[in-house]
């Protein structure tokens, strides 16, 4: 609500300044701000708020799903292996911690599993 006097409730000086500003604000400005805030509350009722909240929640879920790890399909893996074998020069750039093995608190704990290096 842009019409409200925003404060940090933990800041006593800011609270005092906002109270003074509110008490010394011209009456017509107070009325205008109050009308605008009441209109916003009338128009943006609990149903609208819940609808917006659920849309945003769904957007978060969609974002999470888009960022979820995607594994190679057998077909894609075969194409990569075929292209690699046919390449004149080859380079493999691997990210170890978190990709080939799960993240570990200490580097010595980040050990590859048996199937990691035997493919």
Image (spheres, rainbow, N blue to C red):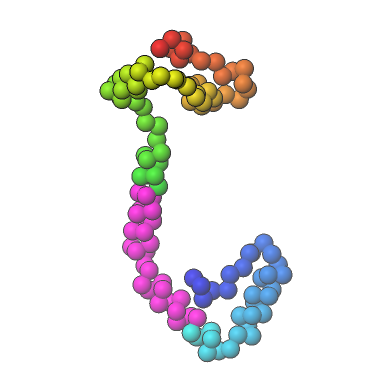
* Quadrant in the picture for residue 6: bottom right
As drawn, 92 above or below 19: above
- Quick one: quadrant of the C terminus? top left
Identify which residue is drawn at 53% across, 23% down.
Answer: 96
Q: Nearer the viewer, residue 34 or 91?
A: 91
Residue 22 forms part of the magenta stretch: no
* Quadrant in the picture for residue 43: bottom left
Q: Residue furthest right?
A: 13
- Is residue 25 among what the camera can see? yes
As drawn, 100 above or below 62: above
Q: Nearer the viewer, residue 92 or 43?
A: 92
* Quadrant in the picture for residue 89: top left
Magenta stretch, main secondary structure, is: helix
Q: Nearer the viewer, residue 79 or 33?
A: 79
| Left or right of residue 4, residue 19 in this image | right
Q: Which residues are magenta?
A: 33-59
The x and y percentages for residue 92 are: 47, 22
As drawn, 3 above or below 108: below
Q: Residue furthest left?
A: 75
Identify which residue is drawn at 35% across, 53% down.
Answer: 54
| Left or right of residue 31, residue 107 in this image | right
Residue 50 forms part of the magenta stretch: yes
The x and y percentages for residue 94 are: 50, 24
The x and y percentages for residue 116 are: 45, 15
Identify which residue is drawn at 63% across, 64% down.
Answer: 8
Q: Nearer the viewer, residue 86 or 67?
A: 86
Identify which residue is drawn at 45% across, 79% down.
Answer: 36
Q: Residue furthest front?
A: 88
Total residue callouts = 0
- Is residue 81 among what the camera can see? no
């Amino acid at each position: 609500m842009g019409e409200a006097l925003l404060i940090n409730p933990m800041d006593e000086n800011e609270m005092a300044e906002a109270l003074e500003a509110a008490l010394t604000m011209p009456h017509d400005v107070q009325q205008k701000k109050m009308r605008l805030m009441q209109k916003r509350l009338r128009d943006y009722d609990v149903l609208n708020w819940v609808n917006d909240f659920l849309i945003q929640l769904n957007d978060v879920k969609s974002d999470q799903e888009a960022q979820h790890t995607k594994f190679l399909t057998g077909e894609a893996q075969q194409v990569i292996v075929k292209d690699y074998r046919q390449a004149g020069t080859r380079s493999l750039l691997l990210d170890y911690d978190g990709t080939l093995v799960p993240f570990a608190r200490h580097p010595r704990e980040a050990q590859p599993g048996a199937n990691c290096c035997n493919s």
